[in-house]
Image (cartoon, grey):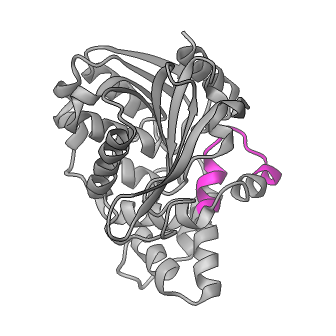
Amino acid sequence: MNTDYQIQKGYLKVSEIHEIYYEVCGVDDGETYLFVHGGPGAGFSEQDKRFFDFKKHRVVFFDQRGASKSKPFGSIEENTTQNLVDDIKTLLSYLKIKKVNIFGGSWGTTLSLVFAIQNPEKVKSLLLRGVFLGDKRSIDHYVNGGVQNEFPKEWDRFKANVPLDSNLTIPAYYLGQMLNGTPQNKKFFCYEWVLYEISIFKKGIAENEIDAIINEFPFESLAIMEAHYLSNNCFIEENYILDHIKILDDIPATIIHGKYDAICPVEYAEKLHHKLKRSTLYIENCGHSDSEPGIEQTIIEVLNQ
């Protein structure tokens, strides 16, 4: 997986509380990319390195606050979209990178777009896989019943863990259990949250695949961070991205999206594409996962053009 080309790795203190883990892989004079992972809370993995050719790319990978190897693990304190945007600026400055190509997937598209809107002079291009706009409609689709017709069994199981007499939203109830429940409760609600996501994120996923995928990454930070962000409207104003999209008129963007994406319906990608002046849209015969062949191959082709 080209790991001979690792330049550096370490922790960067970004606040009194948080240290983010980062790795820089590739060649010093390569085309520079920032990889922005999804979730929120998923962290990056060794698998994410497969998209790049480290003989010609220089890639910055990092775990967002509270995610994976970043410290403290699973912490929602001082953890908002603006904090994450500021961390990217701090990291790029620390690495002396003035301008970068950004590749974000899923929640990573939200964060990449917000960063680019606030710092267009630092962004050379955008590669966005599985567009999530972080607005009320997108959030409701994912955690408020938008998938129930297509995935009734998965939705019913996810919803059934919230008592009927609870006046909290599903994400808020799950988050309360993850943070304040007994150790067994915390584990149960983290697992159930991620089980729901993985059950619907890939076209035709088999049951035996689901557990294997869940155990590949630190699912607790993914569950806590997703519930935290989705309970708080992703900490951005409603329609923030589309309302400020004109700022990105001069930045080339490539959008790759699955036609059968159950988590982020393809209409979001189409809407973004129509609003962006310099975008190319690829719609693949896939779901949400970047491991589906159509999406994976297109990402690799775009990165190696």
> Is 211 situated above or below 78?
above
Question: What residue is shown at x 62% (from left), y 27% (from top)?
Answer: 51
Evaluate whether residue 290 shows in this view. Answer: no
Relative to 36, is 186 above or below? below
Q: Is residue 198 magenta?
A: yes
Residue positioned 53% across, 52% down in the render: 10
Where's the C terminus, which quadrant? top right
Position of residue 267 measured from the top left corner of the image (x, y, whole percent): 40, 31
When the figure is inspected, residue 119 is found, relative to residue 135, above or below; the finding is above
Q: Nearer the viewer, residue 294 or 46?
A: 46
Side (left or right) of 276 relative to 197: left
Tell me where the magenta segment starts and ends, as one range.
194-209
Quadrant housing the N terminus: top right
Image coords of residue 185 (percent x, y):
60, 84
Determine which quarter of the picture holds residue 23.
Answer: top right
| Quadrant of the image occupied by residue 190 | bottom right
Q: Nearer the viewer, residue 163 or 65?
A: 65
